[in-house]
Image (cartoon, rainbow, N blue to C red):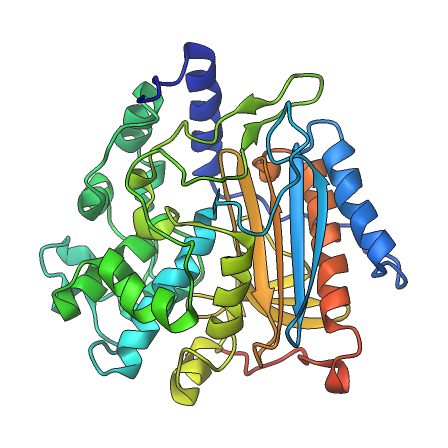
Amino acid sequence: MPRSAPAPRRRATVTALLLAGALTAPALAYATPPADGTSDRELRRALAELVAAPGGPPGAIAVLTRDGERKVYRAGTAEVGTDRPPRTRDHMRIASVAKAFSGAVALSLVDRGALRLNDTLGQRLPHLPEAWHAVTLRQLLQHTSGLPDYSRTERFQAIVQADPRHRFDSRRLLEFAAGQDLAFPPGSRYAYSNSDNIAVALMAEQATGQRYEHLLKELVYRPLDLRDTSLPSGFRLPRPFLHGYATAPGEAPEDVSEAISTSGAWASGGIVSTPADLGAFFGGYAGPALLSPKTRHAQTRFVPGESQPAGPGVNAAGLGIFRYTTRCGTVLGHTGNTPGYTQFAAATRDGRRTVTVSVTSQVPLDPALLTRLRTAEERFVCALLEDAPGGQEPHGYGDGRS
């Protein structure tokens, strides 16, 4: 039976979450965990305390993979009202971590000669506003394009407010911002924009004549054996799934798992995956399995810039990937948040160690809770890098603008 539309209270809740999520979060400090905080007991406690915090997520799951050995840490429940724990094959919305997938598609096409990092919007997508034509693929992938964010326009937000399940034409999302000029000259500074990865996907389609969803399957899912990852256009989630919630201190969690349509996020945040697939993806994408050494070198030229939400440690932006420099070393990955879910996923540069931390609420809406989450994420990064050769992942990889 088809599910009914969101009830009025849920619609108001989801609208507030969506509009808050469309705004850039402020940079936040976070507490540094003690040096001995990476034991299994401490890691489990970090998740348990996050779930138990006022307004905390009902469920959390973290997965550490080190040289083929996997450890899973859980807290709370996959669905309020049940005792079912979160599992590694549960589906979930990965939000802006989907931007790493569009990076993987684009950079794979660069490897194949179908795209170049210096290709411009004017060359590939001349129908877009002329004021945007000088923006390059490289700048889109690094969030230095200056493109106005379609998801922050009044017209887009009004549609979402009226109907969170509205089905957008994903390939026309940039039209919401078409009347705006660039926020700054391309390449002059960093500014996170959801428009960037919509444009990346459109460039990939123009270069190949194939739909972005097909390119994901051929260039990413199949090479990395991702069997539970997809890009739906509606609001339903594949079964089984981690239920996502709107939470607030003193209030009962409200299930918003299927309250929104992913068509309004598409290549910028619409992908559904699992903790197991997400770790496998970053092992290949941050590691050597997916891209050539030359393309990986370009990918890992970093500029200062935080992912949204900010990940652990000091953040810097590469091409479709972020560097997280913690007290224990450095990993490459991405974060994301959307109503009901917050994600962090990363890997070491050799791809042999991966970490994912997934929680079932939109944590960045509560600064104190985000501080707690970032502290927990750093604990897991430290556990990941423990006993790594030479203190695995030095604080580098070639900083500077490309």
Horizontal side, residue 256 vs residue 347: left or right: left
Q: Position of residue 33 (x, y in %)?
A: 83, 56
Viewer-proximal residue among 392 and 360: 360
Residue found at x 83% / y 57%:
40
Residue found at x 80% / y 39%:
49
Viewer-proximal residue among 304 and 40: 40
Residue found at x 43% / y 38%:
22
Q: Residue furthest left?
A: 127
Viewer-proximal residue among 132 and 35: 35
Quarter of the C terminus within the rendering: bottom left
Horizontal side, residue 149 vs residue 339: left or right: left
Instruction: Name above or below for residue 146 compared with residue 152.
Output: below
Horizontal side, residue 145 vs residue 393: left or right: left
Count of number-bearing discs: 0
Q: Position of residue 257 (x, y in %)?
A: 47, 31
Q: Is there any visible trace of residue 188 in the rendered image?
A: no
* Image quadrant in which you'd find residue 165: top left
Quarter of the N terminus within the rendering: top left
* Image quadrant in which you'd find residue 47: top right
Horizontal side, residue 323 vs residue 143: left or right: right
Q: Position of residue 205 (x, y in %)?
A: 18, 62
Q: Position of residue 395 (x, y in %)?
A: 67, 77
Viewer-proximal residue among 203 and 28: 203
Q: Is there any visible trace of residue 284 in the rendered image?
A: yes
* Image quadrant in which you'd find residue 351: bottom right
Residue found at x 76% / y 66%:
382
Instruction: Name above or below for residue 167 compared with residue 274.
Output: above
